[in-house]
């Protein structure tokens, strides 16, 4: 038996940790893109902000500066996608369930959680790469501590459900911001720019190497979409995330001897991802598909809360 | 050791060991120990002293030692006191015989803020109100132990007793092979046993026990989570509990689960906004009535705090005689109540020799240490006493015993006090040990951590 | 005298309250001057029974909503018969020692003026002093509807010279306690003298414990000891302690309250 609050804390602890990492990778992508030669009018920082859900912060502005992004997505104390906010929330959730975590998990979350508290934007920009690397290392260490030492009980499952939901969410939000560059029509716009845009998506998900392995460097919107949505092997693809969700929901259902609506929702989504091919997805509209999947993922998160009373 | 007679007998073994080990190594070990404390995050304020909630309390490596014979006496005395205090609580919330007998004036009880009229007639399981009684003890000479005060609500600091021992065993395993020290690590099991024994009579099978904490921002949160973990019970926050059908439930991933016993670390005022402070954000609505209906046991019982009120303290030896028909084993410190005219006159005439305290104060604040105060300070304090005599009590400055303690220039004697944690369920239990607090400043009598106090491991040697 | 009572309280929440928890002391108990023939309390049509039979003489029930709600209707109704006892209340359940009713509370903390008022209340014995006190309060504190609030203290009411039954009763209690006379606050119903149908009010008065007699009621608002027209509901150390309905609402919402009490004398 477990307190519902404990499940809630573990679920959100994992979500915030995953989100901190995702935001760090987004900023990294923005930084890389800003260095690459490309059309000046294309402002990658803007899509970074949008993918991080900080739309309000860019409304009305023509261009978004790196300083602005660092302030909003790295250092902000109240933007729910900023790295600082996520690390603080992850640590607060962990503190409340301290005894459910291993020593190493706790230490990973506790060490340096105040790193960004007093940092100024200019200080942060000076060593931006180091800071982003540090965040990625935290996330990797936490994951390692979880896999290496955590007891495989329901606590483990709630932790992973949070992580997979957040990850699916991130991939979908990125697709939502960038879906137009993946539409067939945009191919007429011309090679150079699209190539550049496609790479940015893969970079944001740290998937460019993996993509190369899979597709041998042959960039095309179809293949990229296939990779991000339907790949069974890429750990940030929608299908992979839903596979993880189903695995942990199944384990919980077995553990508690009862399955809930959330399992049906996850199964239906997985079924769709397994039987449909890209043609069908594009036919009914890529954007519509993404919007639908975002809605389903939100609903799924609520259904998990309902099922386990948190 | 600061004492011409040399260390007392029980210390001899340790003294030889210290000599052999050398001060440098000890100092190094101390730094190591503090690093461990900091890393595992044992930071909290003992006794609700306020200040930085993530403060680390200085740890002294030299244990405070009781011989087996000394402990027998302390233990019998503490258990006796815990039984008398619970008998007193039952009495004042029922027929009030001790007041009818003229031993304690009625108004000291009935007008006391810590007395809860709503508890009149309530029958707590086992007639236990205070399930963990922390008794603060000092010694003034080789023979006598004196009680400074009792703590009947939710005395804190027991995690130090456990952690200090853990650290000592880790640092100096060889020391423990020389001296036979009684273990203290049975405390969590004994506590759990005591809590289980006071489950409501209607509860069949293993009772569901939970520790109720105000939450992670409380200064003793570390202790709450540590104890819950060691006992293997749920650590719940008010939001995890709700009352339905007059019973208390906790929200779990399998749905509501009934709770039978709550070890609560939240003050009376805040446990139930429907019964006490309506603005409490910490409470569980209806908890007090669920308790009064006998559907859940609260440890300690609401209203138990009156037994550790400073105005009531004076009467504890009388309670022992009245309820148990025994002579008190542990003495009180002589205390003058300024509320009484004669006492007040004596206090005002002898301020320079006395320690004066506020009746409802705690943590060593707001008190006057006569011999250490300036003439002006004493004069100002006298005015305060005259303005509100009921609010003050006075005690002689005690010639407190010292215990060898590490200083920068080696070992020297420092004043200590001691708090054992007596558990009351169907039986009265006392784990051989407790929390020793030490005044790290030379000559200081104040052991509170906020004012330069530290902690030590406490050893009870076996026969 | 038989009273048919229907006491209806309706609370509205806008926007809806997330969760409402109630503690109800809406259950009259028998004593020598009062017998409860039938009684029923419902919250949103759900019957509620007492959970706690307190030795202070009250019965208390709990109720809480499962879901969000925008309206709450609490109904207490039944038949209570009373007889004249010259204000003396005997035979209440519970054994609470009168001594506990000497405590001060925030609402009844005495000031110099209250002590002086008790000083003015002279008489041969405690009982006559209390009668004098009742007369003094009736005279000094004018009954003025809406002139005070639930937070008005006894001292403020005396200073301002106006108040309602709650203020009268609290002032009486505060003053009596300064003379070491245990006193408590009583909430109940009153069947008005000039009987128009449905003219009934929730009312409040005081009870003081007089050695040799026991608990005696005093109603400074009407300057008399409770008669058979009074139905006793519950008591406490002050108005807050004797609230028949205490609620705790979760969610940011505005609460508005409507109360109606119908007491009808029934045909013999």
Image (cartoon, coloured by chain):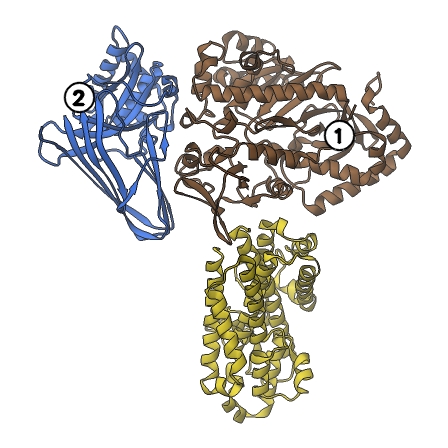
Chain colours: A yellow, B brown, C blue
Looking at the rendered structure, which numbered label has been put on residue C148? none
Q: Is residue B230 above or below residue A244?
A: above
Q: Which percent across, then down, holds residue A140?
A: 68, 64
Looking at the rendered structure, which numbered label has been put on residue B182? 1
Q: Which percent across, then down, holds residue A46?
A: 53, 75
Name the image quarter holding residue C15.
bottom left
Of residues B179 and B142, the one nearer the viewer is: B179
Name the subunit of mark 2: C
Q: Quadrant of the N terminus of chain B?
A: top right
Name the subunit of mark 1: B
- Residue at left 35%, top 28%? C107
Give the Cα separation between the discs numbered 2 and 1. Answer: 70 Å
Q: Which residue is mark 2?
A: C83
Name the image quarter holding residue B379.
top right
- Residue at left 75%, top 15%? B142
Q: Which percent across, then down, holds residue A205?
A: 61, 75
Q: Which percent across, then down, holds residue B392?
A: 53, 18
What residue occupies the far right of the structure in this picture? B20
Q: Is residue C253 left or right of residue A80?
A: left
What SS does tag 2 mark?
loop
**Is the residue under label 1 in contact with that under label 2 (CB below 8 Å)?**
no
Q: Quadrant of the C terminus of chain B?
A: top right
Q: Is residue B373 left or right of residue A183?
A: right
């Amino acid at each position: 038996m477990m307190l519902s609050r404990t499940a809630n804390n573990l679920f959100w602890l994992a979500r915030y940790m995953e989100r901190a990492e995702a935001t760090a990778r987004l900023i990294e992508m923005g930084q890389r893109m800003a260095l690459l030669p490309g059309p000046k009018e294309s402002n990658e920082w803007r899509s970074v902000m949008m993918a991080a859900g900080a739309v309000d912060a860019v409304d009305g502005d023509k261009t978004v500066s790196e300083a602005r992004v660092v302030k909003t997505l790295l250092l902000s104390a109240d933007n729910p996608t900023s790295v600082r906010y996520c690390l603080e929330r992850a640590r607060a959730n962990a503190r409340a369930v301290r005894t459910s975590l291993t020593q190493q998990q706790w230490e990973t979350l506790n060490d340096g959680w105040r790193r960004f508290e007093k940092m100024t934007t200019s200080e942060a920009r000076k060593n931006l790469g180091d800071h982003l690397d540090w965040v990625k290392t935290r996330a990797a260490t936490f994951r390692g501590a979880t896999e290496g030492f955590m007891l495989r009980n329901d606590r483990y499952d709630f932790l992973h459900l949070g992580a997979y939901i957040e990850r699916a969410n991130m991939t979908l939000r990125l697709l939502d911001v960038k879906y137009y560059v993946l539409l067939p029509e945009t191919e007429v716009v011309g090679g150079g720019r699209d190539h550049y845009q496609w790479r940015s998506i893969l970079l944001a998900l740290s998937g460019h190497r993996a993509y190369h392995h899979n597709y041998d460097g042959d960039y095309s919107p179809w293949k990229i979409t296939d990779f991000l949505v339907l790949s069974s092997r890429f750990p940030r693809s929608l299908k992979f995330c839903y596979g993880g969700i189903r695995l942990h929901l199944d384990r919980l259902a077995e553990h508690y001897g009862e399955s809930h609506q959330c399992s049906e929702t996850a199964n239906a989504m997985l079924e769709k991802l397994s039987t449909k091919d890209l043609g069908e997805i594009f036919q009914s509209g890529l954007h519509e598909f993404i919007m639908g999947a975002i809605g389903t993922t939100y609903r799924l998160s609520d259904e998990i809360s309902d099922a386990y009373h948190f | 050791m600061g004492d011409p007679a040399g260390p007392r007998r029980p210390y001899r073994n340790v003294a030889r060991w210290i000599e052999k080990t050398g001060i440098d190594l000890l100092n190094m070990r101390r730094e190591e120990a503090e690093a461990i404390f900091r890393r595992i995050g044992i930071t909290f304020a003992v006794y609700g002293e306020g200040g930085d909630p993530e403060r680390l309390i200085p740890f002294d490596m030299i244990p405070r030692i009781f011989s087996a014979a000394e402990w027998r006496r302390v233990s019998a005395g503490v258990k006796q006191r815990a039984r008398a205090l619970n008998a007193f609580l039952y009495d004042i919330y029922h027929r009030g015989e001790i007041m009818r007998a003229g031993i304690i004036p009625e108004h000291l009880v009935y007008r006391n803020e810590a007395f809860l009229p709503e508890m009149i007639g309530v029958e707590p399981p086992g007639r236990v109100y205070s399930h963990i009684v922390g008794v603060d003890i000092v010694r003034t000479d080789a023979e006598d132990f004196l009680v400074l005060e009792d703590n009947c609500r939710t005395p804190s600091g027991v995690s130090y007793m456990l952690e200090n021992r853990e650290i000592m065993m880790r640092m100096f395993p060889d020391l423990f092979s020389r001296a036979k020290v009684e273990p203290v690590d049975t405390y969590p099991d004994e506590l759990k046993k005591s809590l289980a024994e006071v489950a409501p009579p209607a509860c069949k099978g293993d009772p569901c026990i939970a520790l109720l904490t105000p939450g992670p921002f409380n200064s003793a949160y570390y202790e709450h989570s540590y104890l819950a973990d060691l006992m293997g019970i749920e650590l719940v926050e008010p939001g995890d509990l709700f009352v339905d059908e007059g019973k208390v439930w906790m929200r779990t991933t399998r749905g509501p689960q009934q709770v039978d016993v709550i070890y609560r670390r939240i003050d009376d005022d805040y446990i139930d906004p429907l019964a006490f402070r309506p603005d409490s954000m910490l409470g569980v609505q209806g908890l007090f009535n669920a308790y009064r209906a006998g559907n859940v046991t609260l440890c300690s019982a609401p209203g138990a705090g009156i037994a550790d009120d400073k105005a009531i303290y004076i009467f504890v030896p009388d309670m022992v005689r009245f309820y148990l028909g025994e002579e008190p084993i542990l003495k009180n410190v002589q205390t003058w109540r300024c509320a009484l005219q004669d006492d007040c006159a004596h206090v005002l005439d002898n301020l320079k020799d006395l320690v004066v305290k506020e009746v409802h104060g705690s943590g060593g604040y707001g008190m006057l240490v006569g011999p250490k105060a300036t003439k002006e300070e004493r004069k100002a304090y006298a005015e305060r006493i005259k303005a509100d005599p009921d609010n003050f009590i006075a005690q002689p400055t005690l010639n407190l015993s010292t215990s060898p303690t590490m200083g920068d220039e080696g070992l020297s004697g420092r004043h200590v006090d001691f708090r054992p944690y007596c558990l009351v369920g169907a039986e009265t239990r006392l784990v051989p040990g407790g929390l020793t607090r030490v005044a790290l400043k030379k000559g200081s009598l104040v052991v509170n951590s906020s004012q330069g106090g530290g902690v030590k491991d406490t050893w009870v040697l076996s026969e | 005298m038989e009273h048919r009572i229907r006491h209806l309280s309706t609370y509205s929440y806008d926007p809806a309250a997330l969760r409402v928890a109630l503690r109800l002391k809406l259950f009259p108990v028998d004593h020598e001057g009062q017998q409860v023939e039938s009684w029923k309390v419902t919250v949103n049509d759900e019957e509620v029974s007492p959970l706690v039979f307190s030795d202070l003489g009250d019965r208390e029930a709990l109720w809480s909503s499962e879901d969000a709600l925008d309206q709450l209707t609490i109904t207490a109704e039944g038949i209570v018969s009373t007889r004249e006892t010259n204000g003396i209340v005997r035979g209440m359940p519970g054994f609470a020692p009168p001594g506990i009713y000497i405590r001060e509370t925030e609402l009844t903390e005495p000031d110099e003026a209250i002590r002086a008022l008790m000083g003015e209340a002279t008489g041969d014995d405690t009982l006559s002093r209390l009668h004098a006190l009742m007369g003094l309060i009736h005279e000094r504190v004018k009954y003025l509807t809406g002139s005070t609030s639930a937070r008005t203290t006894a001292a403020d009411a005396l200073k301002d010279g106006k108040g309602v039954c709650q203020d009268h009763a609290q002032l009486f209690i505060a003053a009596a306690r300064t003379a070491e006379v245990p006193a408590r606050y009583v909430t109940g119903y009153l069947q008005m003298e000039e009987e128009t149908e449905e003219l009934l009010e929730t009312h409040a008065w005081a009870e003081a414990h007089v050695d040799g007699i026991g608990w005696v009621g005093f109603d400074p608002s009407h300057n008399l000891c409770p008669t058979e027209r009074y139905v006793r509901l519950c008591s406490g150390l002050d108005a807050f302690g004797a609230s028949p309905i205490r609620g705790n609402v979760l969610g940011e919402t505005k609460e508005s309250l409507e109360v109606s009490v119908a007491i009808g004398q029934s045909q013999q």
